[in-house]
Image (cartoon, rainbow, N blue to C red):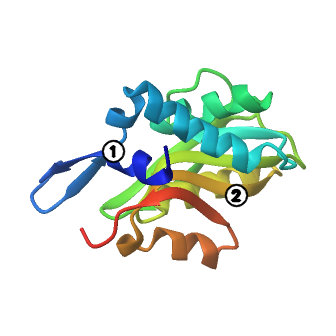
Amino acid sequence: MSLETIKQKIRTIENWPKAGIMFRDVTSLLRDADGFKLTMNALEARYKDSKIDAIAGIEARGFIFGAALADRLGLGFIPIRKKGKLPGDTISQDYELEYGTDTIEVHTADVKSGQNILLVDDLLATGGTALGASKLLSKCGASVHEACFIVNLPDLGGADKLIKESIKPFWLVEFEGD
């Protein structure tokens, strides 16, 4: 199986959540045991020799891929959640969305100054959430090794925004032009 196999296992839902949107749904990849295993094998191969201290996953699908990768690499997992969802002491970061702003948080005890952290999410679109998560980790004194995604939507410019902020993006597959 190849990366093209991963792409084929990600379904497209037209006109969701609104007209004109081609939603790339990774839940179809998750439910496919072979596709999920191929995805995790590819991520493990990329990061197995990296000098990463922990993996941070962005709510919600970033939790799935990030936690599975952390387990494979023998690393801890750090959840980055929407405001008000974590029970302990948190630090927060506002970030830009294409239609406004939102806030994400992390437990202050989860990130240590000087850590080199891999940031994981399912999809890179405009880059707002990943930029916010990177700023959040930086506030805690950590550095982002790389921002890792299963899918990139290059027409939305998120990768360029991350690169402009000196954050290296990586993805397994991309969907262009729609």
Question: Residue 30: x, y in percent?
Answer: 41, 30
Query: Residue 146, labelled with which disc?
Result: 2
Residue under numbered circle 1: 10
Lateral position of residue 130 relative to residue 151, left or right: right
Q: What residue is shown at x 60% (from left), y 53% (from top)?
A: 148
Q: Nearer the viewer, residue 163 or 132?
A: 163
Amino acid type of the residue tagged 1 in the rendering: Ile
Q: What residue is shown at x 75% (from left), y 47% (from top)?
A: 47
Q: Tag 1's secondary structure?
A: loop
Q: Is residue 60 above or below residue 93?
A: above
Q: What residue is shown at x 24% (from left), y 68% (from top)?
A: 178
| Marks 2 and 1, how far apart at CA | 23 Å
Q: Is residue 60 visible?
A: no
For residue 154, which quarter of the picture? bottom left
Q: Tag 2's secondary structure?
A: strand
For residue 134, which quarter of the picture? bottom right
